[in-house]
Each structure stands twice: as structure tokens, then as C-alpha cells.
Image: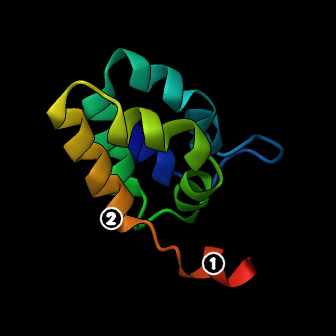
Amino acid sequence: MLNLLAELVAGPAGMPKFTELILARILDVADICPYPTLEWLAAQVPRNKIVHQWCLNSMDTWVEHFLVAHANQRVRNGMSHCFAFIDFHDHFVEI
């Protein structure tokens, strides 16, 4: 369901895109059910520029918690898949 909402581009004028609404609360959802949330992020990062940019801009809030410190190996693996799809080239060129 989130995939369909995130890929919906056209909507009523003045309404925010569903992707932005999803990303505003995605880390809260990830605290409750991390693996499906991170799996969704990993699927969206390579094909959705908004999700990709959000992942780059908010790395300080999720990388350590989900990629390094989480107790569940499956969650760390899911996060590593998401991390692998992030293209850092543009980010480092700006710095």
C-alpha cells in the first residue's frame, strides 16, 4: 500500500505528496516494526528521488541505530541493503 501511495505523483493542487507525509513519520514506524519499514525504504531509495534525498539528509538519525547498534541481525541486514542503494556521489561533490 505504501508503494502505491509513494508513487502517486498527481494529486489535488496544494496537497503535499504522499511520500513526504510517509517520510515525516517513517522513523516512528521503524521503531515499532523495523524490518518491513527498512525493506520498504530499500525498495524506494533507487527509484524515488524524494526518498533518496531524505535518506541522505537524515543519515544522522538512523544509520547508527539501525545499521550498527540494533540487536536484531535481520534489521541490520535490511538497513545495509537500503544503505547500499544510496548514491553518495552527489552528496560528496557538494561538500
| Location of residue 20 (image quadrant) | top right
- Residue 39: x and y in percent read 28, 43
Quadrant location of the C terminus in the rendered image: bottom right
Cα–Cα span, label 1 and label 2: 16 Å
Q: Amino acid at mark 1?
A: Phe
Quadrant location of the N terminus in the rendered image: top left
- Residue 23: x and y in percent read 57, 38
Query: Quick check: 71 left or right of 64?
Result: left
Q: Are marks 1 and 2 in contact (CB under 8 Å)?
A: no
Q: Which residue is mark 2?
A: 84
Along the viewing direction, whichever of 81 and 24 lies nearer the viewer: 81
Residue for point 32% across, 27% down: 34
Judged from the image, the secondary structure of the residue bearing numbered disc 1 is helix
Which of pointers 1 and 2 lies earlier in the amino acid sequence?
2
Residue furthest front in the image: 69
- Residue 57: x and y in percent read 65, 54
> Does residue 80 sit above or below 93 in this rendering?
above
The answer to whether residue 36 is seen in the rendering is: yes
Q: Which residue is mark 1?
A: 92
Residue for point 39% across, 47% down: 41
> Does residue 76 sit above or below 83 in this rendering?
above
Query: Quick check: 5 left or right of 69?
Result: right
The answer to whether residue 1 is seen in the rendering is: no
Query: Quick check: 61 left or right of 77?
Result: right
- Residue 6: x and y in percent read 49, 47
Judged from the image, the secondary structure of the residue bearing numbered disc 2 is helix
Along the viewing direction, whichever of 45 and 19 lies nearer the viewer: 45
Q: Amino acid at mark 2?
A: Ala
Disc 1 packing (10 Å; few <14; some 14–19; many ≥20): few
Residue for point 36% across, 66% down: 85
Label 1 vs label 2, nearer the camera = 1
Residue furthest top in the image: 32
